[in-house]
Image (tube, rainbow, N blue to C red):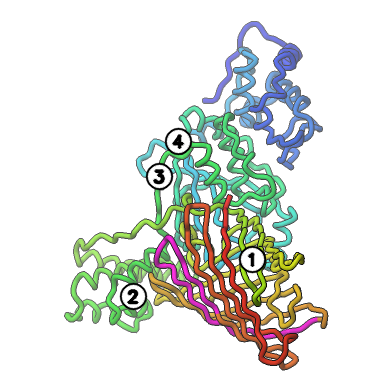
Amino acid sequence: MFIFSICFVHASSQEYIEKADKLKLSQERYWQLLLHMKDGTSEIDDARFFFASNGKNDAKSELHATIEAIINETRFDDNASACKFPARTAWLTEELNITDLPEVTCSEYEETLKKLDPKSATLVFPSAHINSPASMFGHTFLRINSSYESRLLSYAINYAADANPDDTNAVIFAIKGLFGGYYGKYSLLPYYEKLKEYRDTEQRDIWEYDLDLSETEVLKMVRHIWELNGTHSDYYFFTENCSYNMLWLIELARPSIHLREYFHYDVIPLETVHAAKLEHIIEKDHYRPSKRTILLKYEDLIQEKYIHMPKDLLTSKVTLQDFLDNTAIDIQQKRYILEASIEYLEYSFSKNTMDKKKYLKLFHNLSKERASLGKGEKLHIKVPPNPIESHRAVRLTLGGGVREDTGSMFLGIRPAYHDIEDSSYGFLRGTQIEFLDFLASYTDNSLEVENLSIISIVSLAQRTEFFDSLSWRTKFGWDKNYLDNDTNFIGSVGVGYSWGNEFAYIYMMADPLFYHSKDGFVSALGASAGVVIDKYSFMNTNLEATRRFYDDGSKQTLIHASQNFRTSQNTQLSFKYDFKGRKHLGLGSKEESYQAVLHYYF
């Protein structure tokens, strides 16, 4: 049990406080980390986390109050101060050489510690969810590994907004998430439950990065996690989010690590993995394919003439007995079909598309028949490019070009974080999410804004036999794609379809949009077709043609093409061509431009 012994000679709390002040413990980095202090103020917003009334803003007062509380205990069970704050107690005991703490019995803490059995820690990165804008950045949480051989029996430490985006209006959820309208809370769950949530239900591949932390360091982390139990803090989507709060825990395990110093204005989950790599605390990684990835693999393995059968078996279009009696299907194809049926059944149940009774009956029957066919070929899924080897989030652009026979220079910056013309190496194919993408041009002593996107999101989800998701995209900001030559505000939300193979993918979109120009508000409907060729990791080709129909009867053609070369992890060379119909130049007029730009990511 977590017990502090009693000595016969007792020092007063005041003596320990004086000793602590002499040692300047309140200024120690570890104490600041325990309080989540940043610039003199704790980021914990729950009063229950502090002993002192001004503890949130005064590390010294909180230190004094903590010493008073653990020396002068009034409760000696799970409600004791030492039981609620084992990390503070352990550190102060060591630093002040306290030998006469009151004896307390911390049953709940000891039971949790035994259940966790902390031996090591892993930073877990569920990649982007292609059809969820709230999840396109990915996510990170920590896994506390035990002595069990199977990591599925370990526990996950997660931090998230205390809200369900699926039950909340998307706009309200986004606004409240941006401005601290939700509380963020830590949770402790079995790791297999988190896998079920992210890998199976949300179709997200999982990357696990084992951290170079000793058992003693992981124990420090776990002690502090217990102190955060039940507390809350204001949640901010870009700053004090899921990934940022994992950084506190890693720094507490090893205070010499300074992960949070890599971030100033936003904390993107994948960037926290990059930071861990830069701090040299990642030992090795492991990949867990999502349910979506597994089903797509079966689509490759099942012959085209049988690809409909996994669904048909679930909907009873084909009976299980008729399928098994079909001698035209070889035994390995039958194995693949039944395995895919089971995978799709589990996926369908996780999406609440069938009741539990039907699910259990089908699962039993399909599993029994699959077992009767004997051991088959092992499913081999190729490990995709590691996200840790992808480009960084911030992009600086520098280049030059020609527009209507006039030379121009281009300079731009994008704080976050990826578009479909960037190399998709390590990213989810067909996704884009950009904030505050800015590009300026300099032509004939004139400086102009070419583009300023407040937000631009694209989700080109390729349709397959098992997945029939819609593709969609949205943009709000300023660009120069209107009929005149000015920089105008645009708002657009489009929807469409996408199909692809390993060589490329194509898409067709309908984009209702509006512009606010010198003529006021103008609405239009855009119809687009595009192709992205991305077979090779060192380059990708993007082509898109758009026809716009404006509410005043005007029509416009836009064509964009780019050839992009990934010259290193964080550099890319792009050659671009743009054709734009321009009303102000006369009927049937056009504007053509050519660019060569270098992107640098950091």
* Figure quadrant of residue 393: bottom right
- Residue extent of the magenta highlight: 521-544
| Mark 4 element type | strand
Residue identified by numbered label 3: 151
Q: Amino acid at mark 1?
A: Asp
Q: Amino acid at mark 2?
A: Pro
| Mark 1 element type | helix
| Mark 2 element type | helix
* Figure quadrant of residue 433: bottom right
Mark 1 crowd level (few <14, some 14–19, many ≥20, 10 Å Cα):
few
CA–CA distance between discs 2 and 4? 41 Å
CA–CA distance between discs 3 and 2? 31 Å
Which of the two marks, 1 or 3, is nearer to us in this view? Answer: 3
Q: Position of residue 125 (x, y in %)?
A: 50, 51
Residue identified by numbered label 4: 120
Q: Which residue is at 20% across, 78% downward?
A: 329
